[in-house]
Amino acid sequence: MPANDTLPYNGLQLDRAGARRGDADWMAQVLARPDARVLAFRRDACLTAGGRPVTAGPRADAVFLGMDGDDGVFAVDLSDMDEAAALRAAGADAATNVRALFRTVGAQDAATLAYARGMLHWARNQRFCGACGNPTEVRHAGHQRHCPTCDRLLFPRIEPAVIMLVEAPGSPRRCLLARHRGAKPNGYATLAGFVEIGESFEDAVRRELDEEAGVRVTSVSYQASQAWPFPSGIMVGFRAVAESDDVAVDQDELLEARWFTRDDLLDLLAVHRTEGLDRPDSIEAYLIGTWLDEQ
Ligand SMILES: [Zn+2]
């Protein structure tokens, strides 16, 4: 199984140049160079031609992503145009979901596109100050916004979520998967949920498992994390061990939760591959894969 830094969207190798991106003159020079790469997006979708991300022309409002060697990498948001106009402006033929590109563009481009999508999503939703309602202004090449009316600074925000593989106590080894409301007949998945204010990650794991599946756990241990800017998440993966086999699902959230042996899980994964239910770009695949590999 992959190490943490090879999970999809992790391990971005661009130099974010955090100490220099506040230098507007330097930024303008980098953007004006012929080798600058400007990715184009519209409403979270990457503009592509022939299935590859296009490089658009520079715009003053381009968000700086980082340096790839001597070349700047930027992203522009064409959400102020309708789709046809945005495609024309960028020389693109489609607006493509970033996650759909994960298999074809390579690990570094997948990470760059996810990062770009998250940055543009944040910027598009912070055009007005949440404290006083007046327009905000861009700073630091898109990495800060400032409200000139009340002098508030806004920084890109991440919303953490926990995702966990729960093991039953005793043998044979079994892990818990659930079907959420609206899931297909074989659409079992690990449990996950957002961290609430005032919780640690471990607190959130315990609460979510208790609330959704009626499962109490004796231990919670960190496994790996994954950049997940869809639109603003980070997934924090855990392994937990249940106190007992008891499961009592909250029917508002889940249709069903049950224990899977290794053989049950291998059968399920075979079904997923044929029915297209799996999420190969998710940390879920890592949590399940490492568990299977241990046995
Ligand atoms: Zn304000």
Image: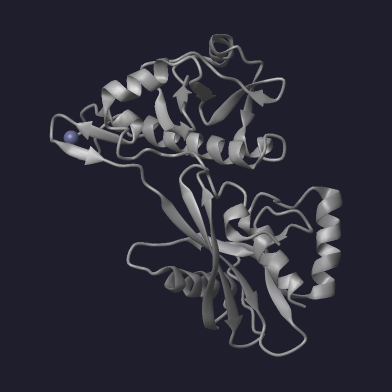
Residue located 52% across and 78% down the image: 220
Q: For this view, does 28 lie left or right of residue 213?
A: left
Residue nearest the viewer, comparing 13 with 214: 13
Q: For this view, does 224 lie left or right of residue 104?
A: left
Q: Quadrant of the N terminus?
A: bottom right
Residue located 22% across and 33% down the image: 146
The residue most toward the left is: 150
Q: Position of residue 72 (x, y in %)?
A: 45, 27
Q: Quadrant of the C terminus?
A: bottom right
Q: Quadrant of residue 262?
A: bottom right
Residue nearest the viewer, comparing 111 with 149: 111
Residue located 37% across and 32% down the image: 123
Q: Position of residue 86 (x, y in %)?
A: 54, 14
Q: How is the image coloured?
A: one colour
Residue located 67% across and 52% down the image: 182
175 over 30 or under it: above or below:
below
Q: Position of residue 275 (x, y in %)?
A: 83, 49
